[in-house]
Image: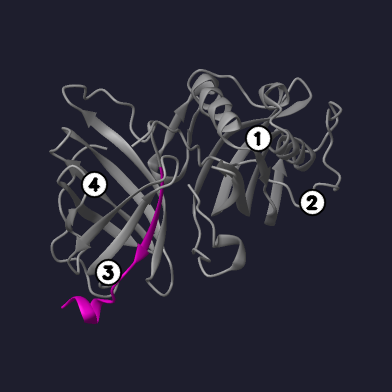
Amino acid sequence: MVRSTVVLCVLYSFVSFTSVALADPPRTATPEQVIRTLVRANVEKDMATMSRLMAHDADITSYSVGGRKYVGWQEFEREMQEEFGNVQKFEIPIRELNVWTKGDVAWFTMELDYIRYVTEGAELKRMLLPLRETGVLERRNGQWVMLSFHESFRSAQMNSPVAQSTVSPSQQVQVSNPPASTMPDLSGEWDILEVEDNKRYKATLDKNGNGPYTQHDGRFVTTKFADQLWQGTWHQPGNDREGGFEVLLSEDGTQAKGIWWYSRVGNHKNIPPREHGGTYEWKRLTSPASSQ
């Protein structure tokens, strides 16, 4: 496994790269114009503009997918800078955006596709994360600024053309008897690809998504499955490491794409959750029926 921070917080998205987004909005800019300016800044990796239009209060808290938490500007800035360094280019079309304003406060809801282009060898691969966003802005000294946001996955469109490429805590209790209505049969043999290191191995899972894999005597444990979002932990006694994973399972159950991270390396346990890891691509090699 290689170190790679994949920042899924993509609050700022763009409906069209030739739309009315402003590179440097006037102080009279509306909340929507400020959002669209932040969108352009994300696409163009313009941290200076993002910094100018986001509040820097030390206690402001925001949440990204998978429970990632940002307190204050510096945590968010650090991860965005690393994301900018890892990604060759962005495409972030907005599917829906609604903005409301009352006095000096504004809030919005948004659905978007966060598309990252990353280099794998000689190839440029496209990764899609389908997200929904909510957020709050405040007018300070006549200028609207972004305060905080919350984002989550919306239903994965894993069979669409744009999703055919790779995307992007501690020990948890194993789910031994998850509800049949929410848990598909995950049994069978899976081909696992760690994208950044181009490392492949195989996992043999039971119907609940638990089982060994051929990497340092590893074992996967599924802890939760809901709305195609598959979460769990991995454990590797062979090199004394463990961590977690979060992937989106395709509607037909044949592939899953997402992220992995460390929670412990040897005696080092104070690893920031979800910060160090990489991206996964899983492909099912056998069907549940043939694996029984």
* Mark closer to the chain start, 3 or 2: 2
182 or 194: nearer the viewer: 194
Which labelled disc corresponds to residue 137? 1
Q: Which mark is residue 12?
A: none
Q: Inspect the image, locate mark 1, and give the three-letter code of the amino acid beneath it.
A: Leu
Q: Which stretch did the figure color magenta? A: 279-292
Q: Secondary structure at mark 1?
A: strand
Residue pointed to by mark 4 = 233
Q: CA distance from mark 1 to mark 3?
A: 38 Å
**Mark 3 element type:** loop
Looking at marks 4 and 2 on the same chain, the residue that comes earlier in the sequence is marked by: 2
Classify mark 4: helix, strand or loop: strand
Q: Which residue is mark 3?
A: 183
**Residue receiving disc 2:** 16
Q: Residue 2 occupies which quadrant of the picture? A: top left
Residue type (three-letter) at the residue carrying disc 4: Thr
Q: Secondary structure at mark 2?
A: loop
